[in-house]
Image: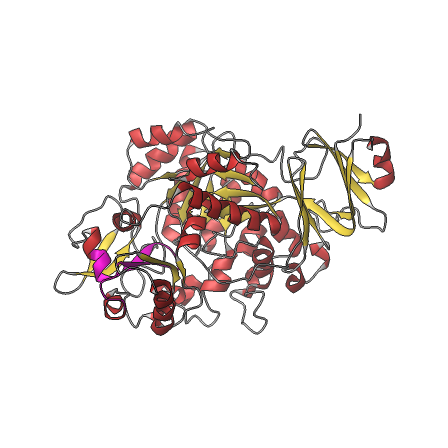
Amino acid sequence: MHADTILLARTIELLTDSDTDPGPHDRTLHGVAVTAGRITAVGPAELLAPLRGPATAVHEFPDAAILPGLTDTHAHPVWGAISTGSGTDLSGAVTLDEVLARLADSAAGRPVGDWITGFDLDVNVFDGEPHGAFLAEHLPGRPVSLLTRDAHALVVSPRAVELSGLTGRESFTDASSVVVDGAGRPTGYVLELQAMDLVFAHYPEVPLDTAAAHVRAQLERFARSGLTGLHALDFGEPSEEVFRHLEERGELPLRVRCSPLVPADSTPDVWQRIAGLQGLGGRRWHVDGVKFMLDGTADNGTAWFEHPDVHGENREPLWRDTDAYRAAVRFFTERGIPTATHAIGDRAVRFALDVFEETGRAPRAPHRIEHLESVPDDLLPRFARLDVVAGLQPVHATRQTRADGTDNWSRRIGPERAARGWRTRDLLDHGAVVALGSDWPIGPGDPRVGLADCQLRRPVEEPDAAPVQPGQAVTAREAYRAMTAAAAYAAGTDGELGRIAPGFIADLTVLAANPLDLDPGAQAVNPVLATVVGGAVQLHHDLGAAAPTPVTAPKDQP
């Protein structure tokens, strides 16, 4: 039987778990044969010759490497694309004057009543607690809403406070709050999701065609950077509408696995509704698994640590009723639905592991803990023992903290806990499965940049920057496995994806050079020649790595 497609390259990089088994590396071309979307043969070109028929499409990449398709295990493609497509980019603005200059450009020529939104606001631009008063002085009468870098807070103008009806007397079922001054008036600093939703409800609606165009453009950028898959850890409006709209007009350029958010302190009727979403999908997107946010972020004081931070904060969970979290995890696990839990503080990580030990894993896929930004020594071996996947985003360490500890995250939690940050190396050494993601749009969406960062423990484009916890660096093989085999294991698809072997789905990434032969700096600009999704080949005219800006928009929005 002839193959539908044959891809030939210098190297087929198997990315096994052995540093001594790099796969074919001689000067003979090697190939992958694909039929009906699955790999049917792998080997030297001459051995695949009998599979080549008159209708076989042959793609030859003489000096390139074919890898299992790269998957970003933590991203937010829909709301991220809409937010970045319609808001003001504040990344890299390190003073209030720079923030105001960008907002002024966005406001120029627009009616005073138009909302001005922004993303990636660095809270370090404030001398003290963030506030919105400065916006009234420089953009009088305008509703302005700025998402902070960690996307767990908003800084809004007095006009936005007024339009949103914020009083500071609101009550929430999670750890949200509307911060007030000494006189009880809202300062314009709005913390966590339920409070932020009161502002989002007044944003102007983005038309479906516009939203879909933003998402399509971003998915194409992901594919051009080498991704064949994404784990979208959210599924809020308008995700379903956008995906269906796009698939009515063509194929998505990569696979998207969506895990809806289970709101903090939600009730069993909500859980049942979310369970009913499982299996919903189209040709290249589907709903699978659920997402919990057990705590918030250390930067704004809402993470859950064993001991408070220097401000007496970072000491409580978002799920105020932790027994409800335990019951919710059990509810989904008993129905065979895998879970992913956002847990940043050491207490949150410990509690999640305790719950997973009680419930056991779902049959199809392991539980996951996402972020785990500070982990004490005694928790490291529990990941492997309990078969819990560690979902890490090392770009948060390399791009949001500093080696000298002068960043907000490090100052708040102190040097002892900061030294336990993003323990990629230690988790691997303790036998854990580590899956890497970007948390796009918080981190750079180009996987080549993130993979280089986690080997260097600094921004790849900043060779003079001191590495953050350099002892946590990983090898190139370990990094790339964390976005291939480990990503498949995390999703329970390791029998079909994440490997180049007969019978596996033909999701592949073709790079101009084998990244395992390159130093990290060269990996970050290693051209992507093609991606293959289910046997469908997309040829790319790579422009090098995307500009690796630090962060860009809302984090862990539902």
Q: Position of residue 542 (x, y in %)?
A: 65, 55
Side (left or right) of 515 relative to 346: right
Which residue is nearer to you in this view: 549 or 398?
A: 549
Q: Residue at x 64, y 35 (%)?
A: 534
Quadrant of res 3: top right
Q: How many numbered marks appear?
A: 0
Q: Quadrant of the N terminus?
A: top right
Residue positioned 42% across, 31% down in the render: 333
Q: Which residues are magenta?
A: 139-161
x and y, in percent, of residue 336 in the image: 46, 28
In this view, 118 is above or below 196: below
In the rendered view, does 360 fall on the left or right side of 200?
right
> Quadrant location of the C terminus?
top left
In this image, 105 relative to 516: left or right? left
- Magenta span has 457? no
Residue 213 in view in this figure = yes
Check if residue 145 falls in the magenta segment.
yes
Q: Find residue 546 and report its horizontal and vertical position in percent.
A: 57, 59
Can I make out residue 357 in this image? no
